[in-house]
Amino acid sequence: MKKKLTIVLAAVLVLSLVLVGCGGGGGGGSQEDEDVVKIGAVMPTTGAVATFGQSSLDAVKLAFEEINEKGGVLGGKKLVVINEDNQSKGEETGAAFRKLIEQEKVVAILGSTTSGDSLIGAPIAQEAKIPMLTPTSTAPAVTEYGDYIFRACFLDNYQAEAMAIFAIEELGAKTAAIILQSDNDYSVGLAKFFAEKFKELGGEIVAEEGYLQEEIDYSAILTNVKSANPDVVYLPAYYDTVGPILRQAKDAGLDATFLGCDGWDSSELFSLAQGAEEGGYFSNHYSPAADSELVQHFLSVYEAKYGKIPDALAALSYDAAYIMAQAIDEAGSTNPAAIRDALANISFTGVSGTISFDANRNPIKPIWINTIKDGKYEVAKTIEP
C-alpha cells in the first residue's frame, strides 16, 4: 500500500481550503450562536452489519477532525457528529431519525448505512425538511422521497448493469446463475437489474436460487447452481452471507467465476470465505489499489488511526462528510434549506471520484470493478459515468 504522505497532505489541504467559509446566516436552531455545528448520523455500530456502520462512523469522525483542525466551517465553527446506533433494525431506525431531528436539533443527517434503513429515515427527514445525505444506500427509491434526500453512492441498477456488461464484454460470459438473499430488498433488486441487463446483452440466466438471512447451509442451492454449469455466478449480498456461500461453493467444487457488489467490501469477507473469495470480482465505489493521492492519503490516515484498511463504506462516508461541510460553507449558514440548496449545486472531488448531483439528487461519478488476488484488491476496470 502506497503512503506518499508529503505529497498527499498538500492535495488534501487544497481540498480542505474549500471548507473555510464566511460566517453564518439564519436557521439551524440555536447553533448560530454556538461554536459547534451538529450533524446527525444513523449508522449501525452493533448488529448484523456492524462493520459497515462502524467503518462509516469512523470515517466521518476522521473527516470532521481534519476539517476542524483546518478551521472548521463558517469561519471557525467545529463540526460535531452525533450518531444513533440503529443496529440496522427498522424499529430502531425511525426512532433514531426522530431523536436527532426533534431532540438533538441537528441541521443535517449523514445516513443511514443500508438501503432498508434509509428508506425508513428518508420520509422522516423529508417531512422535517432536514437535509439527509446517505453515504452508502444504493436502492433507487431512497432519493425518491423528496428534494431533501441525497446520496453519495451510485445506484443499485448502475452497479448491477455495470457488472453484467463486465461479465459479457470483459470475461466473455455467455451464461450466468444468480444466488440472492430473498428476504433482502438490496439483494433482490440487484439480482433483477443484473438479469435484465445480462439477457439484454445476449446472455442467458441458467439458474436463480434464493436463500434467507438465517440460513447457514447452502448445499442445496449450490448443487442446483453447479448442475446448471454457468460461466459466472452473480452473488449480490452482504459479506456476512457472501463469505460462507463462497466457502461452501468452493467445497462443493463449483468453479464458476463469482461476481458481486459493494456489499462484499468488508475485511471480514476474507476470514469468512477462507480463501474462496480469490478470483472473484465485485463492483465498488472506490479501490484501495487506485493510484490517487487522495486515496492513498485516506488509506494512510485511516489505517494509522484505526489499525485497518478502510472499506468502500468508509471511503463514501469520508467523502460525504466533506461534501456536507462544503455545502454548509457554501450555504454560509446552518439553515437546513440553505444547506439543501448548496448540496444540490455542489461539485466535489474526493476519494471515490469527482461528484456532482443530478436532478434526482443522485451522484454522477465513476464505478470501480475490483478483483481479489492473493488476498488483496486489484483494479480490474474503472467505468466513467
Image (spheres, rainbow, N blue to C red):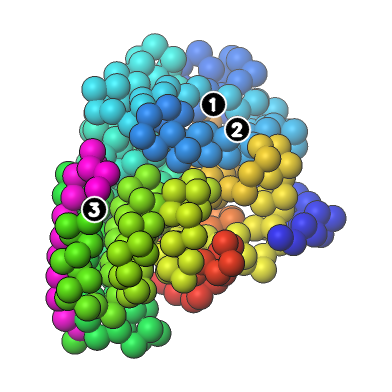
From the image, tell me which residue sits under label 1: 81
| Crowding near the residue tagged with mark 1, few <14, some 14–19, many ≥20 C-alpha atoms within 10 Å | some
Which span is picked out in magenta? 203-217
Give the CA separation, mark 3 to mark 2.
38 Å
Q: Against 241, is 166 above or below?
A: below
Residue under the point 54% across and 26% down: 81
Residue 142 on image: x %, y %: 26, 45
Q: Which mark is residue 61?
A: 2
Q: Examine the rendering and report whether any part of residue 129 can be seen.
A: no
Tell me the crowding category of disc 3: few under 14, some 14 to 19, or many 20 or more residues within 10 angstroms, Cα based.
Answer: some
Q: State left or right for residue 11 relative to residue 80.
A: right
Vertical position of residue 70 compared to residue 101: above or below: below
336 or 164, which is in the foreground? 164
Circle 1 sits in a helix, a strand or a loop, which is it? strand
Q: Residue at x 50, y 22 (%)?
A: 82
| Residue 80 picture quarter | top right
Distance Cα–Cα, label 2 vs label 1: 7 Å
Q: Is residue 139 visible?
A: yes
Q: Earlier in the sequence, mark 3 or mark 2?
A: 2
Please tell me whether residue 380 belongs to the stretch shown in magenta.
Answer: no
**Three-letter amino acid code of the residue under disc 1:** Val
Q: Quadrant of the N terminus?
A: bottom right
User: Is there CB contact under 8 Å for labels 2 and 1?
Assistant: yes
Q: Residue drawn 23% across and 38% down?
A: 214
Residue assigned mark 3: 218
**What residue type is disc 3 on?**
Tyr
Rendering coords of residue 329 (x, y %): 58, 38
